[in-house]
Amino acid sequence: MSGRLVILDRDGVINHDSDEFVKSPSEWEPIDGSIEAIAELSNAGFTVAVATNQSGVGRKLIDMPTLEAIHKKMRQAVTDAGGDLGRIVFCPHHPDDNCDCRKPKPGLLNKLARQYGVPINGVPMVGDSERDIAAARAVSGRPILVLTGNGQNTAVLLAEKDEEVETYPDLQAAAKQLIANNRKSGGQA
């Protein structure tokens, strides 16, 4: 693993979300600037990983080979932009399965910590939903909200609960701030 770890949600952060689920590689469309943001992070010495709920698998809307093809397309887009995308972990379960890996539970984040052999506390975790923020807080991560995807609605919900969270318009703005912070600290985690 190179440098600091950054964990991203997928739908609504990297690519456009869909109420009907992203069910094929052709339906996977990156949000403007998100792929470049991942490349910028990786080129600045960050290891970028993805932790995503993919209940479309548990709902039988998408099979594992198709999910893998979507992730291959995402990974290739980052590579084509000159970056590197690390591990992708996902929860394939239906929301009613009561598994330990579906965010807001911290299972996916803890899995990445084990796989990379790093402590997870303080790790930036970028998401667009309340469950992403809750999962980050559950592991003492650094929750970051982006206003793409469900982010605008999430910002309203959190404000109503009087909960503050670091917020940026999109992944590109969040990445620029993480890179700037890393430079100020001399590149140390």
Image: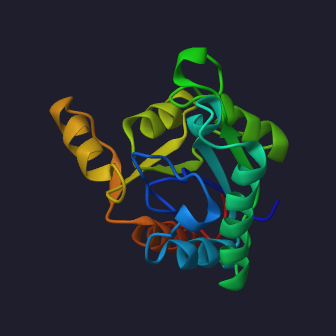
The image shows a total of numbered marks equal to 0
Instruction: State left or right for residue 32 relative to residue 53.
Output: left
Who's the residue at 53% across and 63% down the image? 27
Residue 28 appears in the picture as rendered = no
Who's the residue at 63% across and 45% down the image? 51
Q: Position of residue 181 (x, y in %)?
A: 50, 67
Who's the residue at 74% across and 72% down the image? 84
Q: Quadrant of residue 110?
A: top right
Q: Position of residue 87 (x, y in %)?
A: 76, 54
Residue 115 appears in the picture as rendered = yes
Q: Quadrant of the N terminus?
A: bottom right
Who's the residue at 65% across and 20% down the image? 100
The relative height of residue 98 versus residue 182 in the rendered view (above or below) is above
Q: How is the image coloured?
A: rainbow
Q: Position of residue 55 (x, y in %)?
A: 57, 34
The relative height of residue 165 versus residue 186 in the rendered view (above or below) is above
Furthest-front residue in view? Answer: 61
Q: Nearer the viewer, residue 138 or 22?
A: 22
Q: Nearer the viewer, residue 95 or 186?
A: 95
Q: Nearer the viewer, residue 20 or 75?
A: 20
Q: Position of residue 29 (x, y in %)?
A: 51, 68
